[in-house]
Amino acid sequence: MKANLWVAGFAAAAMTSIIPAAAMAKTRLVVNCFWAPQHFVCADVLPGWLAEVEKVTEGRVVGNIPPKSVAPPPEQLNSVEKGVVDAAVQFNGLIGNRVNGALTAMQPFAGNGSAVALTQAAWETNQKFYPDEFDSVELLAQWVITSGSLFSDTDTPIVTLDDFKSRKIWALPGPLANMAKELGAGVVSTPAVQSNEVISNGVVDSHIGLNGEGLTSFQVLPYTKSMTRFSSSIYRTTFSFFVNKDKWAEISPEDQAAIRAISQDKVGAAAADLWEKADDVYDTFEAKGIKVVDADPALEAALVERATIVTDAWKAKSKAAGIDADAALAFYLQRAAELSK
């Protein structure tokens, strides 16, 4: 019996050897996820995209997600460029020295509307004004998440301009941290996944940029005492999803087209939609003991004024990189308004 099995196995191997290599070849993508494994990007969005990729390529392209991130959040782009992993998601605020157009949707006070609508507007803006900005990787999708807000970690809410200036604030890197610095607050800026360490240890007494989902995911809700409400969305976070160029070149043009066709919808739109669904903590802030206060108009006006300074600096840098930043931002705002109706 053993001999027969061995012969059968040998015969099967021989048959396999005469099948054209291209018919058997599979491209396997190692897709990194820097959030905790239970986060919906790692548990739902990226696995869902991989399942769809396998489906549209009829199994010629498959993939897996490591059980934990192989690189810290700031190194997602570098890890893909170097081939440490094949694909990853990058918070655009951490690569502002590398890209400019990707920060369009992150400009302060440019984010009214649903995350899904803003994601579509951001992608259309990318395709129209800076489709080749990620020249070292193959960009497959981008998305915009729910609005980040201003919070106090003490029993004293932030209401006035003087309140804000007197604070030491944790802020997301990029336009938001720059705006807070322009206004005179002390700023500690780290990736969101490190916010808990800074906030829980009392390094700061307030934070700006996290949304309701972020308060829960990064476990800073217990330290948050109040939220300052503005008349418009102060800030949005954006992400980019891309694949290594050499790995992408292994995929046939037909399968590349099929993957592109499903990527923005299956990653970008799905992520934005899930962020909105996970962000229901905003509706229950007061039930969770978090006081909601309205910002003094002078504080909002001062933030808007400093936002203009930050955005003007971004425009100048973008124009130097060959991007018509005025037109891009105007188009993004117009599409965001139209898609949010």
Image (tube, rainbow, N blue to C red):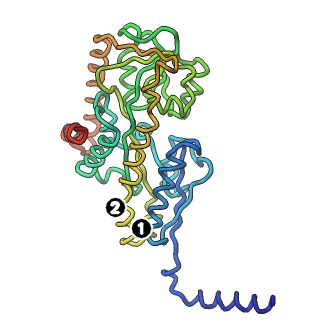
Q: Is residue 56 above or below residue 265?
A: below
Amino acid type indicated by mark 2? Ala
Quarter of the image for the N terminus: give it: bottom right
Residue nearest the observer in this picture, 129 or 234: 234
**Residue highlighted by disc 2:** 261
x, y percent for residue 264 = 36, 53
x, y percent for residue 38 = 58, 44
x, y percent for residue 139 = 38, 54
Q: Are marks 2 and 1 in contact (CB under 8 Å)?
A: yes
Rendered residue at 24%/48% (across/down): 129
**Residue highlighted by disc 1:** 56
Residue nearest the observer in this picture, 13 or 213: 213
Mark positioned earlier in the residue sequence (2 or 1): 1
Residue 223 lies in what quarter of the image?
Answer: top right
Question: Is residue 233 shown left or right of residue 6?
Answer: left
Rendered residue at 56%/59% (across/down): 64
Residue nearest the observer in this picture, 283 or 300: 283
Q: In 3D space, how far apart are the residues under numbered discs 2 and 1 (Cα atoms)?
A: 9 Å
Q: Is residue 156 above or below residue 33?
A: above
Question: Is residue 106 shown left or right of residue 30?
Answer: left
Q: Is residue 45 visible?
A: yes
Could you classify mark 2 by the number of other residues whose Cα lies within 10 Å: few (under 14), some (14-19), or many (20 or more)?
some
Q: Is residue 216 above or below residue 247?
A: above
Could you classify mark 1 by the number of other residues whose Cα lies within 10 Å: few (under 14), some (14-19), or many (20 or more)?
some
